[in-house]
Image: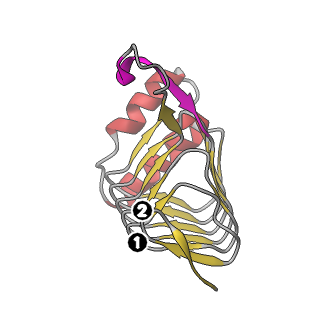
Amino acid sequence: MKIFPLKIRIYLFSGERYSQGYYGLAIRYILLKSIAKKIGRNVAIEEGCFILNPQNLVVGDNVSINQMCYIECYGGVEIGSDVSIAHGTTIMSVTHNYDRHDEPIKYQGTTPLKVIIKDNIWIGAKCTILGGVLIDSGAIVGANALVNKYVSPNTIVGGVPAKFLKNR
């Protein structure tokens, strides 16, 4: 698949966003494997997922990214092995600059911020994970949570912003 230039592979990948069934899963996996830094075995990218800047994505083995997720990989996104990301989740590895008061925020550019999601993690439906966050191994992120800081290993977090709920 690497016979095509990167931009064409990215275009083809985004064009297969809504392909259904096993064909859709297979073609998204094959294309993403030729684009991303690393894609492990048994990775399922369900239909309707938006993955921007996929060339900055690293995914381990046995990962499921369910329907309608939005993953912006500009600053780098690393997802470990045995991770389940429920539908409607947003992962942002970039943030807007806003320090100058003499210029509109939309013209001040952006800053890349890497997101790391370690192994054995369950991210509930409709979560938002902001740039610069590390979610450590064994954690669970409750549905609709906004994760804006470090999540300790083997903990359950939830809420807006996400707070410690209990240990697993």
Q: Which residues are magenta?
A: 104-113
Q: Which mark is drawn over residue 127?
A: 2
In contact (CB < 8 Å): disc 2 and disc 1? yes
**Number of disc labels:** 2
Left or right for 89, reference 31 = left
Other residues around mark 2 within 10 Å, as few (<14) / some (14–19) / many (≥20): many
Is residue 77 in the magenta section? no
* Residue under the image location 65 percent in, 72 percent down: 120
Which residue in the rendered view is the most extreme toward the front? 101
Q: Amino acid at mark 1?
A: Ala
Q: Kindly state the secondary structure of the residue where label 2 is placed.
A: loop
Question: Residue at coordinates 50% horizontally, 66% vertically from top-left?
Answer: 162
Residue 143 is tagged as 1
Secondary structure found at label 1: loop
Q: Residue 40 in the image: x percent, y percent?
A: 65, 54
Q: Quadrant of residue 150?
A: bottom right
| Looking at the image, residue 100 lies above or below residue 168 | above
Per the rendering, the mark at residue 63 is: none
